[in-house]
Amino acid sequence: MSDTAADGHVLQVNVSPGGVPKHPVDRAWVGRLGLDGDAHQHHTVHGGPHRAVALFAMEAIERVQADGHPIEPGSVGENLTTAGIELARLEAGTRLAVGETLLLELSGPANPCDVIKGAFRAGKSGRISILTHPDDTRMYARVLAEGEVRPGDAIRVLPPAPSSMARTLQLLDLLESVDREAWLGLWRAAAEAGFDVRVLELGDAAGAASPDLPGVTMNRAFGLRQVPIVLPELVSFYQDAGTTGWLITDADAPPFPGAVAEDPTGIHAGPIEDVPDAEVAGLEIRAIEPDEATRWAELFVTGFAIEGPLADAWLRFNPILARTRGYVQLIARLDGRDVGAAAMFARRRVAWLGGMTVLPEARGRGIQRALIAARARRAEALGCRRILATADVDGVSATNLEAMGVPRIWTRAGYRVEPRPA
C-alpha cells in the first residue's frame, strides 16, 4: 500500500458476540461491515458501513488507567487496540493502512454509553467522551479495502483521499441527529393531542406511523444511512401499523431492491455567520406569544395549502409543539398583516430551520430570505454555530437558502413501504 515507515501497530484484535468486553483473537477478516465473528449488543447505535470498525489507542487507555479507572484493552468494545498512534487527534478521512491489504478510513468519534460503564470508576464512561477528553476517545472507521488483521500488524497513517467525503459524512451525523430530534418533537406533540401516532425509536433511527394521519409527515423514518441494519424493523413497523411509510435516506442508495426514490430533498448546511441580514420594508418578524400557537398554525396550514385531517391536526397539536423545549415559532407581518410563518429548533449548537411559508399574495418580496436571516440571528444569540435546513431540490426554498449562504451538502429521498395486504 505504501513504502513509508510504519507509524504504529495493532496491539490487540478484539471481537465478541455482543456486548463487552471484546476478547482478543489471533486474527480476523475485516469486511465492509466489520470483523467476522463480531457483533454489537446495541445494533441501533454501533455497526453499519460508517461504523464498521472501532479503534482505541493504548496511549489513551494508559491515561485513563492513570486516573484510576479499571479499563483494559477490549473492555470498552474496540475492535483494534493500537499502539504508537494518537488516533483521536487524526481528522475524519485519515486513512490507516493495516497489515498487507486492509485499508480503513476514520469516520468520527465513538460516543460512550452505559454498556461500557464497568470499565470506569462509578460507571463514569464520559471519561472517554470527545466532548470532555478529546484525546482519549475511541474512533470509528469505514473499510475501504477488506483484509485480514493480526496483532503486530503495522499501521501506516495516510492523508485523506482527495475524493473523501468523510468530513461531510461526519457533519451529517450531527445534523441528522438534530433533524431526528426535531421530528420526534412534532410526532410526540401529535400523539399527546390524542392522534394515533406511533413513535419508534431505535438509537440513531426513529420513525412515526399514523393510521389517523396518512401522508409522509406522520409516516416517515430516519436513520438508515447510519444504521442500515434496522431496515427490517422499520419495514415491519409500517406493515404492522397498516400505513404507507417513507424511509428517508440517501437519494442514490435505495434501501431494498426495487425501491424508488420519491421527492428528492436537499440537506442544506453552513456556518451561521455566513448568513447575511435581510430586510424588507414594512416587515416585522417576531416570535409568537404563548397564546398565538393556533394563529401560527392557521398561517402555516394556509401557506402550505394543507387540507383534510392533517390541517385540523396541526391546529390541535401545535399549542403542544410550540411549548417543546428548543422550538421557536415566528410570524412575519407586512404592513400590519400576517403574511408568513416559520419554525426553528435549536439543539447541539445547530439551528434547524423547520417549516417556512409565505402567503401567496406576499410572495416575491424577499420575505422568505428575511425569515431565514431572522432565525439565524436568533439562533446565533442562543449560541448556535451551524444552520441546518431541508428543501425540495431546485425549489424556491432551495434557491433562497443558497442565496443566504446555506448551500446544499447532500441529497436524500423517501422510499415507500406499503402495508401488508388485507
Image (spheres, rainbow, N blue to C red):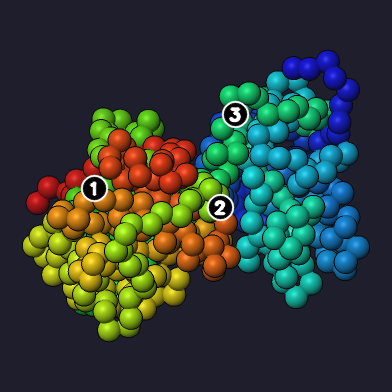
- Which mark is in front, 2 or 3? 2
- Residue 68: percent from left, percent from top: 88, 68
What residue is disc 3 on?
Answer: 164
Amino acid type, callout 2: Glu
- Which mark is in front, 1 or 2? 1
Residue at x-position 81% and y-position 41%:
82
Up the image or down, 261 lies above or below 183; here it is above
Quarter of the image where the N terminus is located = top right
Q: Give the Cα separation between the discs numbered 1 and 2.
A: 25 Å
What residue is disc 1 on?
Answer: 364
What residue is disc 2 on?
Answer: 273
- Residue 151: percent from left, percent from top: 81, 35
Q: Nearer the viewer, residue 383 or 314?
A: 383
Q: Secondary structure at mark 1?
A: loop
Q: How many marks?
A: 3
Q: Secondary structure at mark 2?
A: helix
Up the image or down, 409 lies above or below 269; here it is above
- Of the image marks 2 and 3, the number of the one nearer the N terminus: 3
Is residue 141 in view from this perspective? yes
Amino acid type, callout 3: Ser
Q: Is residue 361 left or right of residue 5?
A: left
Q: Give the Cα separation between the discs numbered 1 and 3.
A: 39 Å
Residue at x-position 67% and y-position 56%:
20
- Residue 218: percent from left, percent from top: 25, 59
Is residue 204 in view from this perspective? no
Q: Give the Cα separation between the discs numbered 2 and 3.
A: 26 Å
Q: Quadrant of residue 144?
A: top right
The answer to whether marks 2 and 3 mark residues whose Cβ atoms lie closer than 8 Å is no
Up the image or down, 274 lies above or below 208; here it is above
- Residue 273: percent from left, percent from top: 56, 52
